[in-house]
């Protein structure tokens, strides 16, 4: 049976958008699994009662979104590269100045304060050990590239210890933006000692299972990062 035999017929208004939505719905339902091929463009157009040019444009959009991929000589394959496509678009916007690193920092605050709190109550002994290892690596790193890698690892290790699938998915999707924002802050930071202090406070609060203190330590750290980006002196912890 043709997996698209029950596809709805579309009205003539906003055909391209409707076609995109209809095919996306079928993909979301796993009607055609990742790795398998959709019917030909002509068959799809007939199935949805739209012109081939409409279907061609819809497929082009879905390909840009990382949901399908044209393979020469084989057809239109269902793929799952939507996360990568989103990251590429966000990176392009960042490069074009349409996204500011402060925008990224606001998202970091939303995610990471909660991640630190959750990690304090959910982290396993093995995850605490991993956070500690990342913290010590961060403290001992000297070269900018090493500090950047260690800083990202520290924060992502905490995110994993939060045991929240959606939070981790968001982290993985926008990791390149995190990297760019952290790199910008590191280049401008004139007080690395304070940065190390903030990270130590975050780690110790998580290790001790102090949920509120872990969240507060992360909040102070990110506020300090904002001060760096704004060219202001950081405020040490009380």
Image (cartoon, rainbow, N blue to C red):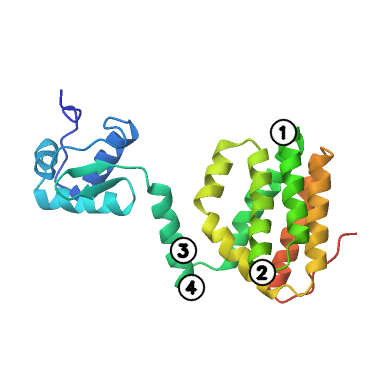
Q: In the figure, residue 221 lies in which quadrant? A: bottom right
Upstream in sequence: badge 4 or badge 3? 3
The answer to whether residue 98 of the structure is visible from this angle is: no
Assign the N terminus to one quadrant of the image: top left
Q: Is residue 190 left or right of residue 46?
A: right
Residue name at image x 67 percent, y 39 percent: 161
Residue bearing the label numbered 4:
97
Upstream in sequence: badge 4 or badge 2? 4
Disc 2 element = helix
Residue name at image x 53 percent, y 48 percent: 172
Q: Position of residue 80 (x, y in %)?
A: 36, 43
CA separation, marks 4 and 3? 10 Å
Q: Would you call the spot at circle 3 few (<14 residues within 10 Å), some (14-19), or many (20 or more)?
A: some
CA separation, marks 2 and 3? 21 Å
Q: Would you call the spot at circle 4 few (<14 residues within 10 Å), some (14-19), or many (20 or more)?
A: few
Q: Which mark is residue 144?
A: 2
Residue nearer the viewer, 26 or 68:
68
Is mark 4 in CB contact (under 8 Å) with mark 2? no
Residue bearing the label numbered 3:
91
Q: Which mark is residue 122?
A: 1
């Amino acid at each position: 049976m043709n997996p698209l035999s029950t596809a709805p017929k579309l009205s003539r208004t906003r055909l391209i958008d409707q076609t995109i939505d209809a095919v996306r719905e079928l993909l979301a339902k796993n009607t055609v699994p990742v790795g398998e091929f959709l019917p030909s463009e002509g068959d799809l157009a007939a199935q949805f009662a739209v012109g081939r040019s409409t279907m061609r444009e819809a497929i082009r959009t879905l390909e840009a979104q990382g949901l399908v991929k044209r393979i020469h000589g084989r057809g239109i394959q269902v793929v799952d590269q939507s996360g990568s496509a989103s990251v590429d678009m966000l990176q392009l916007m960042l490069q074009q100045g349409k996204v500011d690193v402060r925008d990224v920092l606001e998202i970091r605050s939303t995610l990471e304060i909660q991640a630190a709190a959750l990690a304090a109550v959910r982290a396993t002994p093995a995850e605490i050990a991993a956070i500690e290892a990342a913290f010590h690596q961060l403290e001992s790193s000297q070269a900018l590239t090493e500090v950047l890698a260690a800083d990202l690892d520290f924060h992502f290790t905490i995110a994993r210890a939060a045991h929240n699938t959606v939070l981790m998915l968001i982290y993985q999707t926008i990791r390149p933006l995190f990297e760019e924002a952290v790199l910008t802050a590191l280049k401008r930071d004139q007080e690395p000692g304070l940065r190390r202090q903030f990270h130590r406070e975050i780690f110790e609060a998580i290790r001790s299972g102090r949920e509120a203190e872990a969240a507060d330590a992360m909040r102070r750290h990110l506020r300090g990062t904002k001060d760096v980006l704004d060219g202001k002196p950081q405020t040490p912890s009380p």
